[in-house]
Structure formats: structure tokens, C-alpha cells
Image (cartoon, helix red, strand yellow):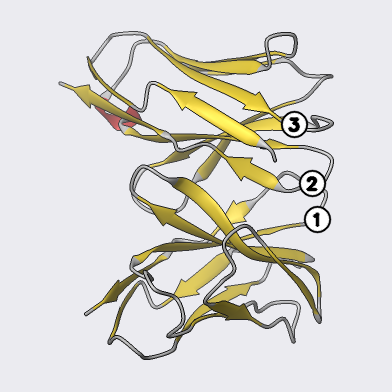
Amino acid sequence: EDKVVQSPLSLVVHEGDTVTLNCSYEVTNFRSLLWYKQEKKAPTFLFMLTSSGIEKKSGRLSSILDKKELSSILNITATQTGDSAIYLCAVTGANSKLTFGKGITLSVRP
Amino acid sequence: DGGITQSPKYLFRKEGQNVTLSCEQNLNHDAMYWYRQDPGQGLRLIYYSQIVNDFQKGDIAEGYSVSREKKESFPLTVTSAQKNPTAFYLCASSIGYRDSGYTFGSGTRLTVV
């Protein structure tokens, strides 16, 4: 059974801090790892990482896939209160099913 | 604009009642999914459909039923057999079942009263 573990489950930082969110996985025939941001309702897509694309960056957010360690990190630099959200990590494997972790609740204080 | 519409946003159900959550997409996506989200549990897959008139059980299908009579629509019925239905329900779609690019609806929060 595919498994995704995210850590920490929650954290509180102050504006301007840099945070690193972790995701580790066990999946048969790994295909991709995805990061989503969920603020109130619908998760919104951030990044997809695959064997051919192990590093992505968009503004203050960046993500790296470590296939050897079966893990990924999501970095957010110069955090803002608008970054407060639940960050979801998900993986797809041989069965193409998307398996989600429990999510990381990030709170950014002014 | 294309997207996924879930309705209603909030739903209250009495114990013993069946309720149906609506999910409609105009993205021309073949695959559709239903997830349940509980605090601290992440998203868990209830049912998915790769194509019209076909659907498969996910990890927590007991107490739920679905239909896929039209490409655009994938309603979820929460039956009285579901012992703990209070949760946030999310519908999603993707171009194909093997496509990782999911688009999510805004969700329905179901509360049993």
C-alpha cells in the first residue's frame, strides 16, 4: 500500500522566516510527487516533481525531490501571512492513484 | 471559465437519511474522484471514475455510492450505512486517469445533526 508521511504536522512562524516542509513516501513504481496549497476549500496545485524534473521554483516557493531518500521538501522563503494554509503532499505510483499525506498546517504570524 | 462546481457548500443530514452531493465539471476531463477530508487525516479516496459508466471503489468506499452517467457529472450519495459521515468532501477531475494534474472543487461540508 502506498504511503505518504508529512512533517511536521503543524508549525507557527513569523513573517519573514524561511520554512521547510517535509514529505517522505513509499510507493510502488513511483511516477510523480505533487505539492498542493489548501487555504479554505479547494487545494490549489503548486508543483509536480518527477524523475525528469526533480527541482521546481516559483517565486518564494521551491521544491526538491530526492529519489534516493524517497522524500521531498517544500521551501518557502520570506514568509507572508498569505502563506498560512495546509500544504498537502501526494504521490502517484504504478496504479496511478493519487495518495495524499495528512498535510502540514502552516501559520504565519505578523 | 472551466472548472469544477460542487454543491451545496454546506449540508446538514439527520441520522438515517441518505444525502447526495453534486459534482459537475466543464473541463472535458475523463477521470473524476471523490475524497473525504477529516482534521488531521489528509485526503482519503472514496470512489473514482476513469470514464463514463465506469467507477471503482477507493480506500474508504463503505457507506457511499456513486454514478457516472454523464461525463460532466459524478454525484456522491452518503448513505445511512456510513457511520461517521460528518466531514469535508472534495471532488476532483483530471484529463485522464493516469494524469496527475488534478483540479479540485471547492468542497461540501456535511454535518450530521
Task: Please tell me whether residue B113 is drawn above or below residue B62 in the rendered image.
Answer: below
Q: CA distance from mark 3 to mark 2?
A: 9 Å
Q: Is residue B102 visible to the viewer in this orientation of the structure?
A: yes
Number of marks: 3
Select label 2 or label 1 by which is in front.
2
Which residue corresponds to mark 1? B97
Q: Is label 2 in a helix, a strand or a loop?
A: loop
For this orientation, the residue located farthest to the bottom is B17
Type of the residue with mark 1: Tyr
Which residue corresponds to mark 3? A32
Quadrant location of the N terminus of chain A in the rendered image? top right
| Chain that bears disc 3 | A
Q: Quadrant of residue B68?
A: bottom right
Q: Quadrant of residue B97?
A: bottom right
Task: Please tell me whether residue A74 is drawn above or below residue B100 in the rendered image.
Answer: above
Q: Is label 1 in a helix, a strand or a loop?
A: loop
Residue B56 percent coordinates (x, y): 74, 68
Density class for disc 3 (Cα within 10 Å; few <14, some 14-19, many ≥20) is many
Q: Residue at x 82, y 47 (%)?
A: A95
Task: Please tell me whether residue A36 is drawn above or below residue A110 in the rendered image.
Answer: below
Which residue corresponds to mark 2? A96
Residue B37 percent coordinates (x, y): 43, 54
Q: Quadrant of residue B34?
A: bottom right
Q: Residue at x 50, y 49 (%)?
A: B43
In the image, which disc is placed on residue A17?
Answer: none
Type of the residue with mark 2: Ser
